[in-house]
Amino acid sequence: MAANDNVAGVDNTFRRKFDREEYLERAREREKQESDSRAKSKSKGPPVQRKPLKHRDYVVDLESRLGKTQVVTPIAPLSQQAGYYCSVCECVVKDSANYLDHINGKKHQRALGMSMRVERASLDQVHLQRSVSALKCSRSGKTLAASQSKILMRESASSRKRRRKGNVNVEKERKRRRKRRRWKRKLKLILTLQL
């Protein structure tokens, strides 16, 4: 019992002791900084007005690197690395499909200062655009209808090719159905002759 008399309580000096005053002061300072930052963010001014989307005034070159081999080194600058380099966003995209997605995407368009909204065209603008395209066609010696018909013919030819490739299985299925119909007709004929 003598050993127990010397113990005044549990020794918990290893636990961390918190100074409430200090932590309250820190919390007040943090709240003050947050309120200041909120006030600064609100006082930045009106949101940036971006221009609506417009046509590209340059040709996207996707075929220049097609079929070429290139040595990839980790120390080469971004513009000389393998893939397609975007100088606006300073990034490298590995293939042409992703490059097209990138240049048509939101990040790239915002870097160019454009929103993803398209400006609504008025009737006068449509007539003006049509007359400009007619003028271009007349300079080349073609009529507008001829150039439009060529475009439609190209589209229809490419769609026919796509249908041919995609409809190979459909054609096979049609042939199978025709065969089944023929066999059913023959069976019906045989059954009717036997009766």
Image (cartoon, rainbow, N blue to C red):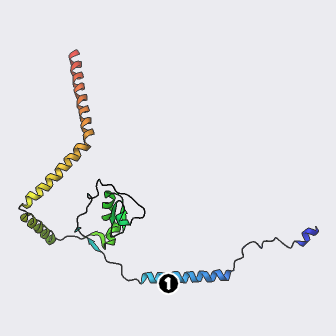
Query: What residue is shown at x 20% (from left), y 49% (from top)?
Result: 159
The secondary element bearing badge 1 is classed as helix
Q: Amino acid at mark 1?
A: Asp
**Residue with the mark numbered 1:** 36
Residue 174 pos. (x, y %): 24, 35
Confirm whether residue 195 shows in the render. no
138 or 189, nearer to the observer: 138
Residue 92 location, x and y as percent?
A: 36, 63
Res 30 → quadrant: bottom right
The quadrant the N terminus occupies is: bottom right
At 20% from the left edge and 16% from the top edge, which residue is drawn? 193
Furthest residue to the top? 194
Question: Is residue 88 left or right of 151 when viewed as pictured?
Answer: right
Q: Does residue 141 lie above or below 183 as drawn?
A: below
Q: Is residue 153 above or below residue 32?
A: above
**Residue 101 occupies quadrant:** bottom left
Task: From the viewer's perspective, tell me whether residue 95 is left or right of residue 145.
Answer: right
Residue at the spot 45% in from the left edge and 83% down from the top edge = 40
**Residue 45 seen from this side:** yes
Q: Nearer the viewer, residue 176 or 81?
A: 81
Looking at the image, which residue sits at the far right? 2
- What residue appears at the point 31 percent right and 64 percent down from the top-left corner? 103
Q: Quadrant of residue 192?
A: top left
Picture coordinates of residue 11 (x, y %)? 81, 71
Image position of 42 with respect to 114: above or below: below
* Disc 1 crowd, CA 10 A, few/some/many (<14, 14-19, 20+): few
